[in-house]
Image: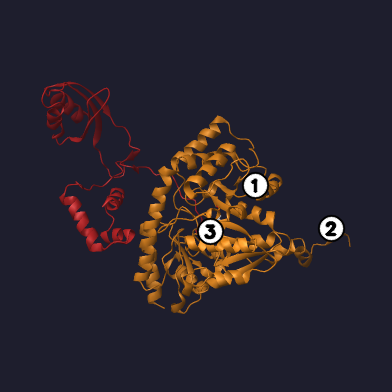
Amino acid sequence: MEKILEILKENARTPVEQIARRLGRDEEMVRQQIRKLEDDRIILGYRAVLDPEKSGDELVMAIIEVRLTPQRDTGFDAIAQRIHKFPEVKTCYLMSGDYDLHVMVEGRSLREVAAFVSERLATIEHVSGTATHFILKKYKEFGVTIHESERMTRLAVSP
Amino acid sequence: MSPSHRSSSTTRAHRLNETLVALPPSGIREFFELVIAMDDIISLGVGEPDFVTPWNVREYAMFTLERGDTSYTSNKGILALRREIAGYMAHRFGVTYDPENEVLVTVGASQGLDLSMRAILNPGDEAIVIEPSYVAYKPMVALAGGVPVVVTLRYENNFRLDLAELRAAVTPRTRAILLNYPSNPTGGTFTKEECRHIAALAEEYDLILISDEIYAEMTYDQEHYCMADQPGARDRTIVLNGFSKAFAMTGWRMGFAAGPADLIAGMTKIFQYSMLSAPIMSQNAAIEALRKRHQNVPHMVETFNQRRRLFVEGLRAIGIDCHMPEGAFYAYPCIRKFGLSSREFCTRLLKEERIAVVPGTAFGPAGEGFVRCAYAAGFQELEQALEGMKNLIGRL
Ligand SMILES: Cc1ncc(COP(=O)(O)O)c(C=O)c1O
């Protein structure tokens, strides 16, 4: 299981047949194990990692630091639920340190993201403050380098 | 005629050392010329990892350059590195060495091989080489004034060493046995028992063992048993190892030799005159590579292991016989049944399918009927290579 997950985390499109060969396992068994990982919601989904420039992606992303006032019974969870359900919110983490929620928001323009933050996020009860940081350029995402600058200098044949 | 006027091509040949002139050209080199003339090929001909050196190692090397580490070092290598190496040999392979006088940092395992041959061979001394073998062994023995004596491994025997044959190759002039396990090119290794038998034989005839264990970390289905860890072997064994393979550091040219103090002192003496010191930048990088080896090595080795299974099972699935390699990153399939020589097979595979593998004969005459495929390539490339091989044999 663990090895299958490692392979899929590296490349979710690895064909089952290849995974089976690489691990020296039966193909049907691997297929079943992956299905079980999905059914058990250990694997929650698969997505592509894009080069935003080449994909023509004009979307704007921002990281919002959100400060909260914790609630007596539910701590931060109830507020975090309210926040992360907005489809504009792509990522939402509870943080240690200076602020409480790390929220990544996507929108079609700076204005749209700013409006979402000021009108929807900042106005939620118990949100005590926000700081918005727009992302200017991505160098690496989910372990994938976006502009590969390394080259392979190996000769085609060596002893 | 004055000596300065002798420049015809016949006299030119005399300008080179006779032993050198007598060395046959490298089979790999010949094939290399063919391959570089083509582009857009998938190469399984490469004897080095397809990983660039892990970033922490590169970053640390840059830091040491910024710090100003640009000098010679002690002949034997930076003491901190020798300590790391001794620690590595102890923890990983169970053999303890004194970093002060039993470890020598070399410019690749290649230099360790050269130094050890020159340090122990007298003119005419014999050194046993086991074929198919890494390309450098016979030339290095010869260039050191020795005589290589070949013991041949056979496919029918799964490339296992026949101890009786090894024994039969020993003569009163035998000085050393060169070992390489896991092996380039067969991917075979030794069991603990085989190691013990070899050590016992060396003791019986008072031979030195030069044990090239550069692929030790890439041992897949068993443990790697260091030759020096065998009973009676430590004080007659020079272990050669290095950073090229498991640490993905070929271009840094970093290796080391570990052995008894007298042999290491002999090698150091040659080193002192011929090299002074290994490059300091590379030595610093090697320190970082060893200190953080747990971060990088297991992941790369696991990747090679998965490639090994994928590739060898793939070969079998298309009808090419191949024993399962136990280590390194080479598969050494048998292509006899297709009725082509190794060279013809490789040439056709290259020209018709644009896939480079190396003729088995580059590793000694015993390699006829075999090709060496380095599976140090991406999964996709391996699958494409298998597809191409399938296409070629479909036409044979
Ligand atoms: C068996 C063997 N020994 C030694 C070497 C040379 O290694 P290094 O880069 O440490 O000189 C190689 C490289 O291919 C090898 O396969």
Above-or-below relation of A50 to B367:
above
Residue that carries the numbered disc 2 in the rendered image: B4
Q: On residue A158, which mark appears?
A: 3
Q: On residue B386, which mark appears?
A: none
Task: State which quadrant residue B69 falls in.
Answer: top right
Question: Which residue occupies the foreground of this view, B121 or B381?
Answer: B121
**Sequence order check, earlier mark of 2 and 1:** 2
Write the residue at 61% across / 60% down: B203
Asked whether mark 1 and ligand 1 are closer than 8 Å, the reply comes as: no
* C-alpha distance separating marks 1 and 3: 33 Å
Q: What crowding class fits label 3: few (fewer than 14 Cα within 10 Å), some (14-19), or many (20 or more)?
A: some
Q: Is residue B181 visible?
A: yes
Q: Nearer the viewer, mark 2 or mark 1?
A: 1
* C-alpha distance separating marks 2 and 1: 47 Å
Is there one chain holding both mark 1 and mark 3?
A: no
Chain under callout 1: B
Above-or-below relation of A87 to A154:
above
Write the residue at 24% across / 34% down: A60
Chain under callout 3: A
- Chain A shade in the render: red
Task: State which quadrant residue A123 falls in.
Answer: top left
- Chain B shade in the render: orange
Above-or-below relation of B260 to B334:
above
Q: Amino acid at mark 1?
A: Ala
Q: Nearer the viewer, mark 1 or mark 3?
A: 1
Q: Secondary structure at mark 3?
A: loop
For the C terminus of chain A, the image quarter is bottom right
Q: On residue B261, which mark appears?
A: 1
User: Could you tell whether B284 is left or right of B269 in the image?
Assistant: left
Q: Amino acid at mark 3?
A: Ser
